Image (spheres, rainbow, N blue to C red):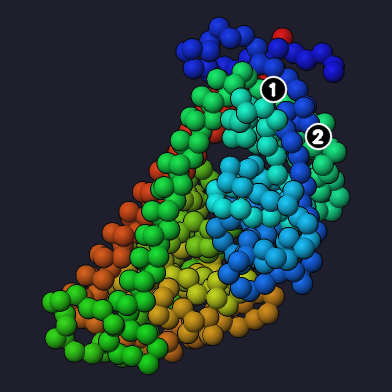
Amino acid sequence: MSKKKKLIPELRFPEFKNEGEWNYDKIDNLFHLQDGYAFSSNAFTDSKLNTKQVIRITDINNQNKNGDKVFVLEETAKALGVEKYKVKKGDLLLSLTGAAGFNFFIWESDDAYINQRTMKLNPKKKENDSLKVILEPLVHSKINEIGTGQNNNLSKDALKEIEFPYPNPKEQEKIAYCLSSLDKVIESHNQKLDLLKDHKKGLMQNLFPQEGENVPKYRFPEFTKDGVWTEKSLDEVATILKGKGISKADIVEDGKLPCIRYGELYTHYNETISTVKSYTNSSPEDLILSKANDVIIPASGETQIDIAKASCVLESGVALGGDLNIIRSKINGVFLSYYLNNAKKHDIAQMAQGIAVVHLYPNQLKTLKLQVPNTKEQQKIALCLSTLEEIITVLTNKIEQLKQHKNGLMQGLFPKMIN
């Protein structure tokens, strides 16, 4: 082994400050490596009785949570003689095809089998069990460097030769506990976020009349006797304008005039816009400025369904760029943006025209049929959904802060090369 520079992390738990440098060794010397079995698709079954899951690349990349899973009958697995490919709770798994980046995953359920292009890794010594948790950040960059081919494939032999630094077992355990505890907090917040998003989706489906209906499935108690919502075409209740061009070159960091470009509706904004991302020094006289309560929809996009995206601008005086349809009405804009994004999304999408690029014009939007409640019910629905969205935004930001905290911890807890 070639001579290595000393490896000492910048941040250490107090009890390890005098432990000196970390060790250095090959993955092959520390881990048992077992690549997967090439299951034929004919071996898979739709039955859930007497079966075990077959873990594929997609299961590892999706952390075994999303997408369809495949199973094999236990009697089929026995006939194939695939016992050594069995995976148990706590095994470290790795996808060997890294088109989307190589991914590690600690398996957390009952027995399963690994498919081809996947691998399980387990420490050769029980005292190094915590290496399973900290191996990924220690070797991530090296793995991506040695991936080859169009799909960025990783071979078992290449993986064996990767050398990486690691501390003594007690420090391994302390670092692993710290990071895995933080991962559990992040995962808990992610689960809460998913539930809130599902709750929002369910509310929108029930607070607005769906196709062929003139009342929603759910109404707040004070509006249950208010009768049906009134049908109107959009041009009866709104004026529809077009924004005026603001190029990417017009955006400046210290600009005086807040502005919105149509592409930002796809990447940055949701149903309400209270804080504007971009600024310009272009003359206001040459632009279209918002009035509080304006609802904006892109005038062009990549697909019909993507273009059906509405946002309410809460502040006046925001420059609205070209390729934006501006709906200006006395209807509560927050209510309208949620309504358009839910019950009317497919109606708007069907209006859009084009192939490579789709377009949506004011004369098309004018014909859109709406069911409109009274002003107080609009306000109540808007407040309900926007309050929920604020909670979702706060939680999303908290998750991002926790991820940044974890990244900062790893930079300090793992050593850099020093002389």
**Foreground pick, 220 / 60:** 60
The numbered mark at residue 165 is 1
Left or right of 92 on screen, residue 291? left
Coordinates of residue 240 in the picture (x, y in percent)? 42, 78
- Quarter location, residue 343: bottom left
- Quadrant of the frame with the C terminus: top right
Residue name at image x 46 percent, y 78 percent: 345
**Residue at the image point whose x is 70% and y is 39% from the top:** 121
On the image, the x and y values in percent for residue 273 come to: 38, 59
Q: Secondary structure at mark 2?
A: helix
Is 231 above or below relative to 77?
below
Position of residue 135 relative to residue 335, above or below, is above
Going by the numbered disc 2, the residue's amino acid type is Lys
Residue 81 location, quadrant: bottom right
Q: Are marks 1 and 2 in contact (CB under 8 Å)?
A: no
For the N terminus, give its image quadrant: top right
Query: Residue at 73% of width from left, 20% of height from top?
Result: 24
Q: Which residue lies under the disc numbered 2?
A: 160
**N-terminal-most mark, 1 or 2:** 2
Near mark 2 (Cα within 10 A), the count class, few <14, some 14-19 or many ≥20, is some
- Image spot of residue 357 (x, y percent): 65, 74
